[in-house]
Amino acid sequence: LLHRFPLAKGHFQRTLCLLLLPAAKAGWPFLVVAGLVGFNFGAAMVLYATQTADVYRAESFGRVYAFVSLSYGLSGTTGPFVGGLTYDLTGHYWPAALVAAGVASAGALFYLLMGGAVRRAASVQETTSE
């Protein structure tokens, strides 16, 4: 199922990496897991562009992708701040990692649940406009 939904697969991979991150306290394990989180996060932007282009028509792509890009940038700037604040308040990164993993999992589930409906609506829109 996940091979048909690469964005959901990426979210689930990110969830796994985020759950492993606090367990890899220092040294090479931490660097490897942090690198996987960063690689996965960076690779998602390419998937966002292709998935947005698949679902929305060319006339709407610019507006929709601008919102997607803005949301992505907002999460990239607020996430580290909230994670650092969480560490300052609790002395641990676990709460921040669990919240981030929960958000990634929720995004994957939402995408899986809504992905088919959005694709069907887009294909109906294409057939009615032709």
Image (spheres, rainbow, N blue to C red):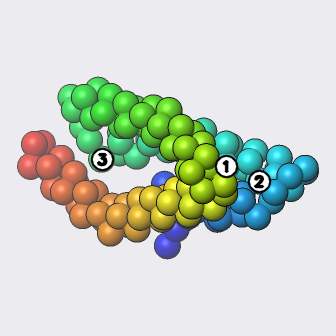
Residue at the disc numbered 1: 37
In screen coordinates, is 110 left or right of 103? left
- The residue lying toward the viewer, choosing from 18 and 97, is 97
Give the mark nearest the N terminus, 3 or 1.
1
- The residue lying toward the viewer, choosing from 130 and 53, is 53
Q: Residue at x 57, y 61 (%)?
A: 95
Say if mark 2 contacts mark 1, CB within 8 Å: yes
- Please say whether residue 26 is visible from this viewpoint: yes
In screen coordinates, is 71 left or right of 89? left
Measured as percent of width and height from the top left, residue 75 is found at 45, 40
Gap between marks 2 and 3 measured at Cα = 32 Å
Q: Residue at x 35, y 42 (%)?
A: 52
Q: Mark 2 falls on what kind of element?
A: helix
- Please say whether residue 58 is visible from this viewpoint: no
Residue 21, image quadrant: bottom right
Q: Work out which residue is located at the far left of the displayed protein and give it.
A: 128
Residue type at numbered disc 2: Val
> Label 2: few (<14), some or many (≥20) within 10 Å?
many
Residue at the disc numbered 3: 55
> Quarter holding the C terminus?
top left
Gap between marks 3 and 1 measured at Cα = 26 Å
Residue at the disc numbered 2: 33
Residue type at numbered disc 1: Val
Depicted 65 relative to depicted 129: above or below:
above
Give the mark nearest the N terminus, 2 or 3.
2
Residue type at numbered disc 3: Val
Gap between marks 2 and 1 measured at Cα = 6 Å
Q: Mark 1 falls on what kind of element?
A: helix
Q: Mark 3 falls on what kind of element?
A: helix
Indicate which disc residue 74 carries. none
Q: Residue at x 61, y 46 (%)?
A: 88
Depicted 17 relative to depicted 39: above or below:
below
